Image (tube, coloured by chain):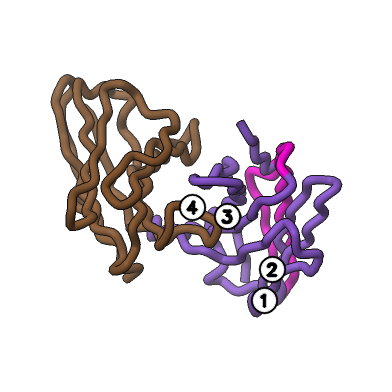
Amino acid sequence: DSGVTQTPKHLITATGQRVTLRCSPRSGDLSVYWYQQSLDQGLQFLIQYYNGEERAKGNILERFSAQQFPDLHSELNLSSLELGDSALYFCASSATGTANYGYTFGSGTRLTVV
Amino acid sequence: AQTVTQSQPEMSVQEAETVTLSCTYDTSESDYYLFWYKQPPSRQMILVIRQEAYKQQNATENRFSVNFQKAAKSFSLKISDSQLGDAAMYFCAYNSGYALNFGKGTSLLVTP
């Protein structure tokens, strides 16, 4: 157990729907990072939050949004889902606002859009 | 944006042998950090080893070591005495700020 908790582990939904993925960072970590892993694109950085504030943004689509709550858990919202959004979504956490010491990853949420 | 290239989609090694996975990166920064992560079939991303660019000495973690060539922008991972449990996807990653930028990965097969 890495200490980073992601729920749900699996999610199957239809095109056009909206889903929410949840992440609880490792105890004491202030930063949360979201990544999308697909076969053709590899691991793509989506967004980072640090202590409740957005810190960095990567290749996140406008249909996707995220937030980090006062208890430091984070949610990634995916809307108007398309078949191409099917992927493994990882959350990771780090103690500080930088990734100089790497991340601790959760076990991921497998999203299947049908 | 910094790019990370892993030119070997797949590698194979026999148990107890040594294998080297390649990684190159492109950056104009002088201070940065490099990582190797392992992703076994369980999907969990596990940090294997970390290198600070300003340190000349190559990082080592038990059977895992790196060959860091800053001028060549090369960061290879050497796995010694390979074990069946080393079979996984291996990702090289670069960081000079907030987020890690990953390569596409190398799939390592370990044969008995």
Under mark 1, the amino acid is Arg
Whole-angstrom CA distance, mark 2 to mark 1, is 6 Å
Disc 2 with disc 1 on a shared chain? yes
To which chain does the residue with label 1 belong?
B
The answer to whether the residues at label 4 and label 3 have Cβ atoms under 8 Å apart is no
- The residue where tag 4 is placed is A98
Q: Which residue is denoted by mark 2 in the rendering?
A: B79
Label 1 secondary element? loop
Q: Residue at x 57, y 41 (%)?
A: B104
A100 on left or right of B13: left
> Which residues, given as a range, are shown in magenta?
B7-29
Regarding residue B3, the answer to whether it shows in the image is yes
Tell me if label 2 and label 1 are in contact, CB under 8 Å: yes
Q: Quadrant of residue A58?
A: top left
Q: Nearer the viewer, mark 4 or mark 2?
A: 4
Chain B as rendered: colour: purple
Q: Which residue is mark 1?
A: B63
Amino acid type shown at disc 4: Thr
**Subunit of label 4:** A
Q: CA distance from mark 4 to mark 2?
A: 28 Å
Tally of marks:
4
Provide the secondary structure element on which disc 3 rests: strand
| Residue denoted by label 3 | B90
Distance (Cα) linking label 4 and label 3:
22 Å
Of marks 4 and 1, the one in the foreground: 4
